[in-house]
Image (cartoon, rainbow, N blue to C red):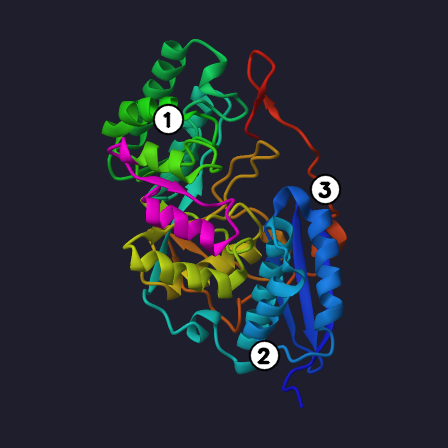
Amino acid sequence: MPTSMIRRVEPLLIDRYLLLEIETDDGLVGLGEAGAWAHFEATSATIEKFGRYLVGKDADHISRHWDTLHRFGNYDGAVTMAAISAIDIALWDLKGKRLKRPIYDLLGGPLRERIRVYGQALGETAESLIASCRNLSDHGYTAIGHINPFLDGAGAASSCNFARSMDDAINLAFAIRAEVGPDVDLCFDMHRRLNPAQAIALGHGISKAYPLFYEDPIRPDSTDAMAHVQANLPIPVATGERFYCLDDFKQLCLSRGAAYLRPSISLCGGFTGAMRLAALAQAFDISLIPHNTFSPVATLASLHLSAAIPNLLICEYPTSLYLDGLSSTQLAGRALVTSIPAIDNGYVALPEGWGLGTCLSDVARTDFPMRAIDIAMHRNVDGSNAEH
């Protein structure tokens, strides 16, 4: 007989997130989150189909369910893997709650007592971006990410004069460094909007600002191109937030295409997939920087993962709602859950409680209706598409 039989699998489209509840016959509810952020409707339908398989089965057979859902039909993709990720996170949450242990204990126990995090800066003007960085620094963050020296909402460097755009971006990078000083690490994020030649030029230009990492300078379509960029730069490249397949990460490791990997736990297969990836990266002496622009559910999952892996550099802590243009110093979406981790001087304590350590709040379903993410692209000045 199953020790904990699944009786309900329910995807929940809440605000700009796709959450998931899995309930077992003992009344416990596990919480998960899917990370194919622009395709939540399709992911929700996939979860519903997977739910028909899961209902009536043992919730403790996490690896078996992961393998079945991944291999069935011989097809996968971002939508499929986001659905598997949400289910996997929820099943680990259930197991932790049933055994009365935090998830990081089930993954082998904590390797650290606290987790360093970075907040997200946002700004459509140089002045607002500098102010956002200063605000995060003033609130105790020792690392700041999501810093786009071409500014949020802008197109790629190729959309205007090359020398002027590079000069402006490099000057802004050093202005931010001067504003926050050397005690704050800066993480520059190009949002995949440069070509390899531009990425190399900019990387050299900002190198003396000593970035902690240089995120997604080009689109991740070509591992060889990313490896070319990294090989020609004195600063570390970080990428991987769009990858959902372990083999894609393997190719990145083999090519030395990045100094750091950026997996999304709600896209790369949940805890089961992320732990496999961490072991792969460790074999190449590569550290992880878990990517996370989602709700506190994914944030807590990232923190449990971060506590349990040896090769962690830093963990993303989403403070901005960049689709809404809102910058903050607090965790985004905190009203959706019953508890969130507190941040202190740039660190977060290990999550408390069983499983993930949180549940949906009483108002999550009623006060935060779905807000669809409509199809849109940034535009260069010539009208061509830039990465969104």
Q: Secondary structure at mark 2?
A: loop
Q: Position of residue 202 (x, y in %)?
A: 33, 23
Q: Secondary structure at mark 1?
A: helix
Is residue 237 on the magenta stretch? yes
The amino acid type found where label 1 is placed reads Ala
The local secondary structure at tag 3 comes to loop
Q: Quadrant of residue 164?
A: top left
Mark 1 / mark 2, whichever is N-terminal: 2
Give the alpha-carbon distance from disc 1 to disc 3, as whole Å. 34 Å
Q: Which residue is mark 2?
A: 60
Mark number for residue 371? Answer: 3
Which numbered mark, 1 or 2, is in the foreground of this view?
1
**Against 387, is 161 above or below?**
above
Q: Which residues are magenta?
A: 231-258
Q: Which residue is mark 1?
A: 199
Q: CA distance from mark 1 to mark 2?
A: 46 Å
Give the image location of residue 269, x and y in percent.
Answer: 54, 59
Horizontally, is 340 left or right of 135 in the view?
Answer: right
Q: Earlier in the sequence, mark 1 or mark 3?
A: 1
